[in-house]
Each structure stands twice: as C-alpha cells, then as structure tokens.
Image (cartoon, rainbow, N blue to C red):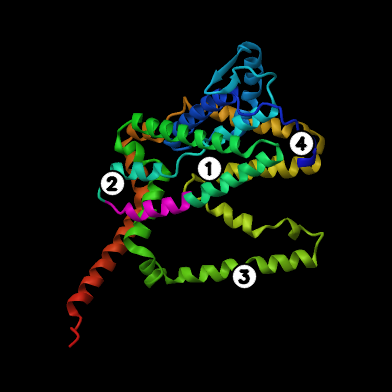
Amino acid sequence: MIDAAVSKTDDPSTPSLTFRALLLGGIFSAVLAFVNVYYWFRSNPITLGIPVVQLLSLPAGWILSFVLLTRQFNTFGIRWSLNPGPFSTKEHVLISVMANASTGVAYALDIVVVRRFWIGQPTYTSSFKMFGYITVKQGLMLTKDQKLGYYMRVPPRHFSICQVLGTVVAVFVQLGRHLLADGNCQGYLYRRRGVLFYSTMVLWGDISPERQFSGKYQSLYYMFFVGVALPIPFWLLQRRYSKSIWRHVNISAMLTYIEYMPNSHTNNFVMFTLFCFIFNFLLMKYRYAWWSKYNFALTAALDSRVGWKQKSLPTEQDVVQRCYAAAQLSYCSQLGSLHVVYADLQVLVHSDATMAKTKTPHV
C-alpha cells in the first residue's frame, strides 16, 4: 500500500511548512475541535475525523495557490512568501497532521466536567492517571505521525511544529466550548462518558485496587487467566482447520469490542453488527463488484447524513425535560452502578471503622 501511494523520489525544494499549510491547518483544527466537543455532550456523539480534512483541504489549498500573492517577505533574515508555488503533497500532509491533533476530545475534559458538578469528590487519583495515560498515548501518536512524515519525505521539524500547534489550538477551543456549554447539571449528568468517568474515579479513588479485588470482587482475578487461555483453543483450531470458518475468528478483536459497551447505547452495537454483516460479508461475498465500487461511498454518505442530522436531533436532556418519568428512569439507569459502588464503599468503610475500634492494642 505504501509503495503504491508514496513516490519513490523526493524533491527537497518542494514547500512544506508554508503560510497556506499553517492557515488551513489552524482553521481545520479549530473547527474539528469545536464540532467534536459540541457532539461530545450529546447522548449519541459522533466524531469528524481526518478524512473530512483531507477531502476539504485539497481544493482549499488549490484555491489559495491561485488567490494568494506571490510576493516574498523578509522577516529577521528569513525569506518567505504567502504563495510559494503550486499546492504540494507535503503541505496536504501537514494540514492533516495538524488537524489530527485536535480531532479527539481531550481526555482531561472528563475531569473538568466531573469536578464542576461533583465538587470535593476523589478526582486526584484520576488526575494522576490522566497524566500518565496521556503521556503514553501522546507519545505513541507523535511517533506514529513521525513515521508518516518519514514516508512522505516531510522534515521532522515541520512535523513537530504542526503537531504542537494543532494540540495548542485544540486545548483552548475545546475548553472554551465547554465553558460556553449549558450550565445545567442534568445535561452533563446524562452524558454517558462523564458518568462512566466518575464511576471510574470512585472505583480507583475511593475503593482503591486493594479493596476492589477482595471480598465479592476477588473473582475478577480469574479474568486474567481467562484472557491468557481463551485465544489458545481458537489458535489451535485455525492451525488444524486452516480453510474453515475458524480462520476468521479473532478473540482479541472480540474482547476489544467489549471495551466500548459501557460508553455506548445498545442500539449502537445492534446497528454496527447488522450493517457490517450485510455490507461487509454478504455483499462482499456475493456482490463483490457492487461492494468494491459503492461500499466506501456508502460509508461516507451514512457518516455525512448522521453528522448533518445530528445538529437538529434533540439531546437526551431535551427529551427527558418533557417527561418526568423518562427523566427519573434515565437518571436511575445511568447512576445505578454508582449506587452499588457507594453501597459497597460504605460497607467497607464501616467494616474498617469497626475493626479499628475492636482491635486489641499491641503491648
């Protein structure tokens, strides 16, 4: 794939870090950061990704190459121009990389939301976890982007500059969008990711790992052995029957799919499974010509339709405000796990206090 998409020769004089790349990269970074955070607070969030930027930035770059002035400027001994020539592939790559740094919603925004509406709760442990997680994740993402720059013959310094600029723009835009959001606590409470993050803070901050894997939760230890042993029989079946249906079974992918269940609605998995079975199995197997020609266009059309319609769809907050029963049902269903956690936490704290009172002092 890389051999077919990447040129085997490189022209070092091709412009990469230009005014056009920084302008378009900054605009798309701000727009994607704002839109993704806007949808993040809805009950069925969607995310606009890099394919949107790649499609829109290419004609935008061509237009700027004809509109901008070709005059050169001298700033502190550095000569530069608004329009150094035709729009290049390297500029297109840098725009995509800069926007890619702002597509995902900042992981720390969960802590900002939770601290705003659950003041005084255990957020310090999650803050420490957030810094550790983000350090590793951002390091992996930066390394992955640098690999793309290596294949596309883009200078590593230009790549690093665009990554930092895209991240800085996303931070201010996403935090500003959050501050401008509706201050109604119930609206944030119905957001599944915020509730999920809060329950995680209770588990790791109040109960702590020491108590989480003891008592009635001690059976969770056995899942480590299940995770290690489960792929082995399927691997043996694949080696024994290499042409059978077992070669399509991937336990790692199936278990990874479960990770998204707490943060999603039930209808998400039903529609995912149904559409994938119809279009990526039945049509690909029996109508391969149609599938290879229209399937990816259909995917883009479905995503675009959802993104266009999402703005007019009511949020879960709008729905429950019109129905008191629905409000109570939604509230109880989303906080049911938290009530169980609190009950267990109170039992643990009470038992520790009782043991501390009845413990015989050491002489």
Q: Is residue 281 left or right of residue 344?
A: right
- Magenta portion: prevailing SS class: helix
Report which residue position mark 2 lands on.
Answer: 118
> Amino acid under label 2?
Trp
Residue 229, numbered label: 3
The magenta region covers: 121-134
Mark 3 or mark 1, earlier in chain: 3
Viewer-nearest of discs 2 and 4: 4
Q: CA distance from mark 2 to mark 1?
A: 29 Å
Tell me the SS state at disc 4: helix
Mark 2 or mark 1, earlier in chain: 2
> Amino acid under label 1?
Asn
Q: CA distance from mark 2 to mark 4?
A: 50 Å
Identify which residue is drawn at 55% across, 26% down. Answer: 22
Mark 4 or mark 3, earlier in chain: 4
Q: Nearer the viewer, residue 313 or 126?
A: 126
Q: Judge whether residue 1 can be spotted in this image.
A: no
Mark 3 or mark 2, earlier in chain: 2
- Image quarter hosting the C terminus: bottom left
Report which residue position mark 4 lands on.
Answer: 5
Q: Is residue 142 magenta?
A: no
Report which residue position mark 1 lands on.
Answer: 267
